[in-house]
Amino acid sequence: DSWLDTRAKHEAAALKPLFEKYVDALLDVIRIECKPVMAGSPWAHVSRDFCQVSTLVTLLKGILKPSEEANEQLSSGHYERLFLYCCTWALGGLLEMKDRPPLNKAMVRLAESEAPNFE
């Protein structure tokens, strides 16, 4: 929540449910169904998860900067699509091509109507 506390109220209200909806579920898919390039010791996923979520936040900060500077309020669907784009790179960036379909399938299932298909 600490990063969300630094964001505009409307933006934090749109993003918080997205973190809750996607992050743990997608990290679980990666942990259970995929072999990230940076796999290692049994506890390595803790460090990797932290780095991936930190990367997600960094990407979100960058992609949201233009709307923040323009004091523009995006629709909830727009926030969700931007969030999914950032998840694709932050969480899926460590996956080989063969491990990307399970992540895509989970994203599409979770996203319902907001889901782009990355296949």
Image: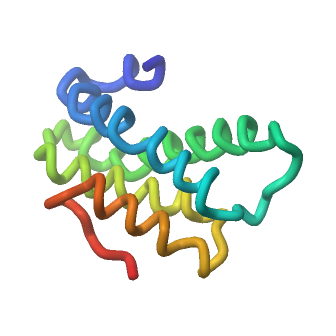
Residue at coordinates 15% horizontally, 41% vertically from top-left? 72
Q: Position of residue 115 (x, y in %)?
A: 24, 64
Q: Measuring from the top left, give residue 101's x and y in whole percent.
A: 48, 74
Relative side of 49 to 81, left or right: right
Horizontally, residue 66 falls left or right of residue 106, namely left
Q: Quadrant of residue 21?
A: top left
Query: Toward the viewer: 32 or 100?
Result: 32
Give x and y (percent) for residue 118.
Answer: 37, 76
Picture quadrant of residue 47: top right
Q: Which residue shows up at 22% across the image and 26% down it?
A: 13
At 71% from the left and 44% from the top, the residue drawn is 48
When the figure is inspected, residue 65 is found, relative to residue 16, above or below; the finding is below
Q: Nearer the viewer, residue 66 or 15?
A: 15
Image quarter in which the N terminus is found: top left
Residue 65, how many percent across, how many down? 35, 45
Query: To which quarter of the image does residue 15 belong?
Result: top left
Q: Residue at x 46, y 24 (%)?
A: 3
Location of residue 96 with respect to 25 vertically, above or below: below
Tell which residue pokes out farthest to the front in this image: 32
Look at the picture and state if 17 lies above or below 59: above
